[in-house]
Image (tube, rainbow, N blue to C red):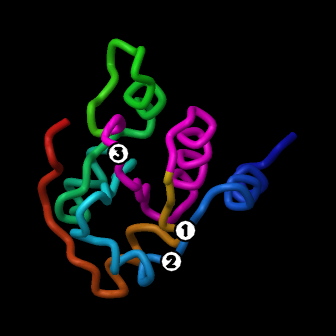
Amino acid sequence: MKRIKDMVAEANEIVSHAAASDMMALHSQEGVTFVDLRDPRELERDGMIPGAFHCPRGMLEFWIDPESPYAKPQFQSGDRFVFYCASGWRSALSARAAQEMGLENVWHINDGFSAWKKAGGPVGDKPEKA
């Protein structure tokens, strides 16, 4: 049986990632889209990175695929994408899935939104509408 720790470690071997403190330099840069993968209840409780695009983890593959009836234009922009979740596990798996689907220039915050907040990163309270 493959464990989640193994799956996250495998994803981190093949996808680009960095700590929240390093990713802060990308915030608000032109051509960079932060993607919040957390559950809506987490957003309400903890806030989110200002300007981030909210994509519930369960919809990611459907929203990335341009042939899907659920495709979102944000994923067709050619931007650099920085995925994040609470601790870096969901974002690692998501970044790997996105990369496997052909989305280029995908990164993830390997220590998550909790580290972003601890490092003093900006936090807002409203997700951008999909």
Q: Which residue is mark 3?
A: 39
**Which residue is found at the position 37% from the left and 28% from the top?**
63
Q: Establish if 59 lies above or below 68.
A: below
Q: Which residue is mark 2?
A: 19
Do tag 3 and tag 2 residues touch (Cβ < 8 Å)? no
Label 3 or label 2, whichever comes before in sequence order = 2
Do tag 2 and tag 1 residues touch (Cβ < 8 Å)? yes
x and y, in percent, of residue 115 in the image: 42, 78
Relative to 19, 84 lies left or right = left
Quarter in which the C terminus is drawn: top left
**Crowdedness near tag 3: few (<14), some (14–19) or many (≥20) residues, C-alpha within 10 Å:** some
The amino acid at mark 2 is Ala
| Outermost residue to the right | 1
The amino acid at mark 3 is Asp
Which span of residues is magenta-colored?
Answer: 75-104
Q: Establish if 52 lies above or below 119.
A: above
x and y, in percent, of residue 37 in the image: 39, 48
x and y, in percent, of residue 11 in the image: 69, 53
Q: Establish if 52 lies above or below 63.
A: below
x and y, in percent, of residue 69 in the image: 34, 12
